[in-house]
Image: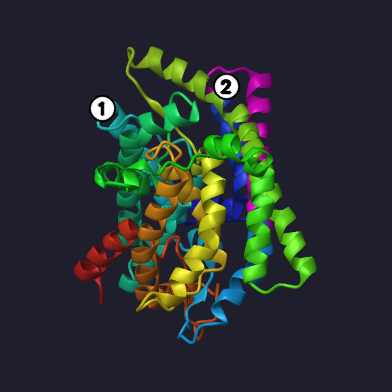
Amino acid sequence: MNGIAGIVATFLGNVGSSVLVAVVMFILGICFGAGFSKSLRGGLYAGIGLAGLSVIIDAATASLTPAIQAFSTNFSKDMSVTDIGWGSAGIAFAWPGLAFVIIGTLLVNVILILCKATKTMWTDIWSIWHGNVLGGYVWAVTGNIWIGVLAAVIFLTIGSKLADWTAKDYQEFNDMPGIGVPCTVSFLGLIAKPFNKLFDAIPGINKINFKPEAIRSKMGIFGELGVMGAIIGVIIGIIGKLPYGGVLKLGISVGVLMVFLPKTVSVLCEGIMPIANAIIEKVTDKFEGRELYVGVDCAALLGHPSVMASAVILYPLVVLLAVILPGNKLLPIASLAIIPYWCGAVAPMFKGNVFRIVVFTLIWTIPVMLIATAQAPISTLTMGNLGLADPAVTNSCFDMAGDPLGAAILQIFRLIFGN
């Protein structure tokens, strides 16, 4: 089994998410009778779409970073925790429990489906990395690989139930029938539902409805996604005191983000949906008409215009929140990349209302920042033990160190099994 673990770890660590998604979707298409051509095209387009998303979000984050860092220079505060962002994913591919978490999660998922305890099939192999990071944390604080594997499988199994509970909202809003999102962001989406009722109950607040479509109709050309993005980028650049060239470049970069990210998501969906439909058809026949969902990556939730409109507004607000929030020591730079995924998770619950998405996500960010700060020693220990970061430099991130559900499981296992 150690040999298998090593092979799987090497493969996943080398190919990355886009290649893995392409390979997995192709294999699923073949296995479920979609045919060679449809499976090959679907796998490639899914991989291309996901790679395109990564390129666009990474480029936008890199462009925004100088302006965002400038926000923090006006405040005198201890921000001693280094933000490693998705660098924490290195834990997933370096810790010794990797293969066992994948095998355990898929096995439990099959059992739950057969027992009718879940509707979501865990076909999103890539997103298992979230559970593997949690497993690495538990392993670091307990010294036991199998306890880490158990924690990871529990976390990911909860994810399949979260996908069940949020599936209808995601399917209808994103026009993607038959999908479920077992990623940890579904937890955020589930919490957003009662907040939407709270917004409805507050006089005045319940009348505010900022939707990209309404903005475009009222503002004309200034409501177009590209123009709106460019204006927001310029404003952020000015506030960040960038040189005029940097301000203009930032405007174009944010405009690119707003225009092309939804188009890239459509490429991803173009690859996923034919294969997902083939899986649903085959499984429905096998399980006598049972309703089952195909687990997809949370990137599939990024296509609605309200998602990136909210994310771009949130970037500077989250940084400002970080520097004024008592107890927080993490200045988010790399972790800002997760914000679009948060917005995508809650946009269906708020029916694309940008105002509600922004307000709720800011509220959500508060516990995430405080948890990420509190768990910085564990993140630092784990990264150091695996040789992924200098153990003398305290580090943390929003995902997974700041994940509330993961943190709760980690603390329970630390309390029961910790040294």
Residue 302, located in which quarter of the rendered image? top right
Q: Which residue appears at 54% of the width and 64% of the height?
A: 316
Residue furthest to the right in view is 245
Density class for disc 2 (Cα within 10 Å; few <14, some 14-19, many ≥20) is some
Residue tagged 2: 274
The rendered magenta stretch, by its main secondary structure, is classed as: helix
Q: Is residue 178 left or right of residue 235?
A: left
Residue 330 vs residue 121, the one in the foreground: 330
Which region of the structure is painted magenta? Answer: 31-59
Q: Which mark is residue 116?
A: 1
Density class for disc 1 (Cα within 10 Å; few <14, some 14-19, many ≥20) is few
Residue 114 is situated, as x and y percent measured from the top left of the image, at 29, 27
Residue 181 is situated, as x and y percent measured from the top left of the image, at 42, 38
Residue 95 lies, with reference to residue 14, above or below; the image says below
Q: Which mark is residue 206?
A: none
Q: Type of residue at label 2?
A: Pro
Residue 187 lies, with reference to residue 333, above or below; the image says above
